[in-house]
């Protein structure tokens, strides 16, 4: 179990050496946190109901947040992950009737990309890598843009998009910023502490999201999970 005090001190140290930051929140909302420790997310709870469409990108081996949303709000959940270990795990799970698994990932382009497994074989999350990083352990997996997914699934609006995609979030956010129709609520795990990304990448991504109308309402204690809400008159 994580030690909260130790976690805070680590983050303060990273902030002191320029590897973390404490962004100010843009608004206060009625919120709740759902999911197991280490796999939980904080949402704006008044913005979801049984008619909501939710995209959860990055299944891993813990869908406690997804299932919790389904049980609490009765929402329709579409989960996305193209990586072999996650797909093997999800096939063994008992899933709610309104939980739909899609065997492709979210990216800033349509097609196939190379994914590398984690360095620790006990972990599950793969990350997108460049062609020159290809080796015997990398796998080629299908990916689609957010707009492509919405079109193919016949959704005019997505009420919540959750992304835990191991560094690919930066390119996806740049792609989302080009669209006219955005998810109402956006949950992102930023990976500025790994995979060659820096806190500068996260600052730029947050600035991009704010420019297109998102407002930050929550940051997790470890400084990795961010929650945004598209401009909503209820919180003016």
Image (cartoon, rainbow, N blue to C red):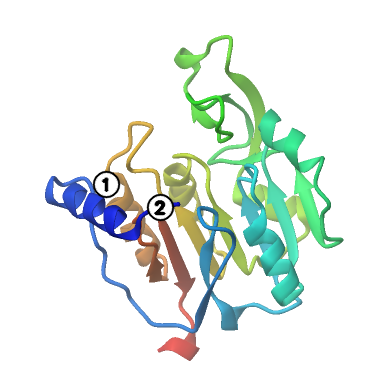
**Location of mark 1 (residue):** 199
Q: Quadrant of residue 83?
A: top right
User: Residue 173 got which mark?
Assistant: none
**Location of mark 2 (residue):** 2
Direction left: furthest residue: 16
Q: Nearer the viewer, residue 176 or 137?
A: 137
Rendered residue at 24%/49% (across/down)? 10
Q: Position of residue 91 (x, y in %)?
A: 81, 40
At label 1, counting other C-alpha atoms closer than 10 Å, the crowd grade (few under 14, some 14-19, many 20 or more) is some
Please give left or right for residue 179 compared with residue 152 in the image.
left
Element class at badge 1 = helix
Direction right: furthest residue: 97
Rendered residue at 28%/59% (across/down)? 5
Marks 1 and 2 close (CB-CB < 8 Å) = no
* Location of residue 53 with respect to 135 vertically, above or below: below
Rendered residue at 45%/83% (across/down)? 29
- Is there any visible trace of residue 162 in the rendered image? yes
Tally the marks.
2
Q: Position of residue 156 (x, y in %)?
A: 70, 66
At label 2, counting other C-alpha atoms closer than 10 Å, the crowd grade (few under 14, some 14-19, many 20 or more) is few
Q: Position of residue 179 (x, y in %)?
A: 53, 58
- Is there any visible trace of residue 177 in the rendered image? no
Q: Nearer the viewer, residue 69 or 212?
A: 69
CA gap, disc 1 and disc 2: 23 Å
Rendered residue at 52%/14% (across/down)? 134
Q: Position of residue 128 (x, y in %)?
A: 51, 30
């Amino acid at each position: 179990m994580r030690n909260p005090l130790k976690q805070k001190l680590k983050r303060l140290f990273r902030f002191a050496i320029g590897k973390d930051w404490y962004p100010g929140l843009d608004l206060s909302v009625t919120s709740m946190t759902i999911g197991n420790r280490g796999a939980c997310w904080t949402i704006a709870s008044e913005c979801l109901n049984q008619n909501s469409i939710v995209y959860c990108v990055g299944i891993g081996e813990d869908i406690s947040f997804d299932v919790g949303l389904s049980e609490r709000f009765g929402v329709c959940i579409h989960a996305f992950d193209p990586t072999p270990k996650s797909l093997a795990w999800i096939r063994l799970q008992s899933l709610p009737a309104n939980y739909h698994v899609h065997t492709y990932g979210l990216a800033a382009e349509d097609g196939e990309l190379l994914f590398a497994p984690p360095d620790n074989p006990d972990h599950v999350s793969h990350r997108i890598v460049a062609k020159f990083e290809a080796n015997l352990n990398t796998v080629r997996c299908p990916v689609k843009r957010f707009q492509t997914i919405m079109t193919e699934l016949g959704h005019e609006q997505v009420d919540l998009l959750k992304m835990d995609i191991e560094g690919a979030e930066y390119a996806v956010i740049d792609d989302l910023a080009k669209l006219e129709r955005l998810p109402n609520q956006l949950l992102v795990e930023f990976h500025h502490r790994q995979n060659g990304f820096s806190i500068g990448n996260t600052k730029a991504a947050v600035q991009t999201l704010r420019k297109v109308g998102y407002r930050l309402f929550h940051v997790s204690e470890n400084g990795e999970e961010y929650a945004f809400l598209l401009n909503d008159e209820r919180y003016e």
